[in-house]
Amino acid sequence: MAARSGSRCNFWLPKKKRSCANTRIESSLFCGNHSQRSDGQWLPCPIDPSHSVLQENLESHVKRCPLLKQNVALSGQVFYQKGINAGNEEEDEKIGSCYSVCTSEMKRNLVYSMSVSKFHQLVKKIEEVHGGICNDIEDSHLSPEACNIWFNKEIDRKLPFQEKHVLQQGSILGNLEKIGALKRCNQSVECSEKDEDSVPAVVEFGAGRGYLTQMLADCYGVKKVYLVERKSYKLKADRSLRQKENLVLERMRIDIEDLNLNAVESLQGVPYVAVGKHLCGPATDLSLRCCLSRQDGESPVLRGLAIATCCHHLCQWKSYINKEYIIGMGISKDEFHALTWFTSWAVDDDHGSKVPGVEGSDLIASKEEEEGDKVEDDSLSSVEEVVKKMKPMERAVLGFKCKQIIDAGRMKWVKKHGLDSKLVKYIPASISPENTLLVAGKLSPVLA
């Protein structure tokens, strides 16, 4: 039970915008965790920087940090291979000023350090590149019949149900079914692992609580479920999934960057589909590399994938899957990081839900209507001033174009690795502005 307000710790949590809810200790305004915050020096834990430790306790804490135990256990797993999907970046590369991890602040500083003329040249380059490659992203808002038990709320009442998430999950699976990567299985349609078109396994990257896989298991009869997630979650779908007869569930608490999927013994040689709902930033690139970059006779057989991308502002040059494509478009490493910074404008508070019917195509059309009124003001002396003068809709259009350029490179990389791939808008932007789905399936004999 939560402490009464008068006995609560007075330490302010800026990220949560509230005071700590723990009970304060006797003769102090703070709880045990925060009683010395104002007196001692707090340092980020070297093992898990998500929490801080008093400097005087640091030596003892690193011996018992919860993440340490997890890392020790993980290092003993055969599928753990540090950095196997991380991508690469030449140490002596001098293309740009951002190296291993380029933070949002570094990206902003990189953009603001440009000359005004160079900034305008970059915007023009983005528009030209986008016009050449991103004109055929179709709407594919699907509600497959196989998922009707979820759409009609005919599921276990203990399972969390939010309509917008169910619509997104259903459309992701519907797009996989549309390209033939999923086959519906129920009492009237028997599927076995011997069927050529059967897909008995699913790997969900960035699985979170696992409810995308829960829907897939309920509606498409998969036999093996692998949930890949680096964080620990409560209220997971795991309990419900484990109650399903003849379903094998394996949750792997591991960073996608370190997962060697070929070393998962129970998945070797097994046909599977890879799914991910809102795989943030570089997680999409890590997942694609995990599935496709090291295939041999013993590898799991990838029949299809559907990844809903998001948070492009977190993307990094090192992990991006198709640097060759970016460089081929005449975009440098620093300019790539500028593109990723621009993507945040697509979904920021300056527009979003305040603009009725926001869609990438609608925004682009609105932008083109304003082109005649757009004048480059030579009197502005810095890029920061130029950005502040830009209309919210103009920034939004640029952000959407950059997101689509980044996703187009991913789509082309997947196609290069043997799958028929495309980008679709899998859900209306009114449900989620992050509505781009990379979907891919095996090539037909005619196309192969």
Image (tube, rainbow, N blue to C red):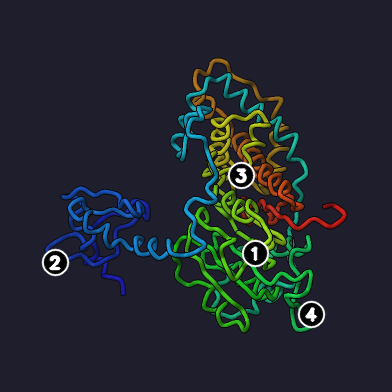
> Hey, what amino acid is under mark 1?
Gln
Secondary structure, mark 1, is helix
Q: Mark 1 packing: few (<14 Cα in 10 Å), some, or many (20+)?
A: many
What residue would you read off at disc 2?
Answer: 26
What residue would you read off at disc 3?
Answer: 321
Q: Mark 3 packing: few (<14 Cα in 10 Å), some, or many (20+)?
A: many
**Residue 313: x, y in percent?**
53, 42
What residue would you read off at disc 1?
Answer: 169
**Residue 336: x, y in percent?**
58, 34
Q: How many marks?
A: 4
Mark sitting on residue 189: 4
> Hey, what amino acid is under mark 4?
Val
Which badge, 3 or 1, comes first in the chain's sequence? 1
List the single residue furthest toward the right.
446
Observer-nearest residue: 238 or 428?
238
Q: Mark 2 packing: few (<14 Cα in 10 Å), some, or many (20+)?
A: few
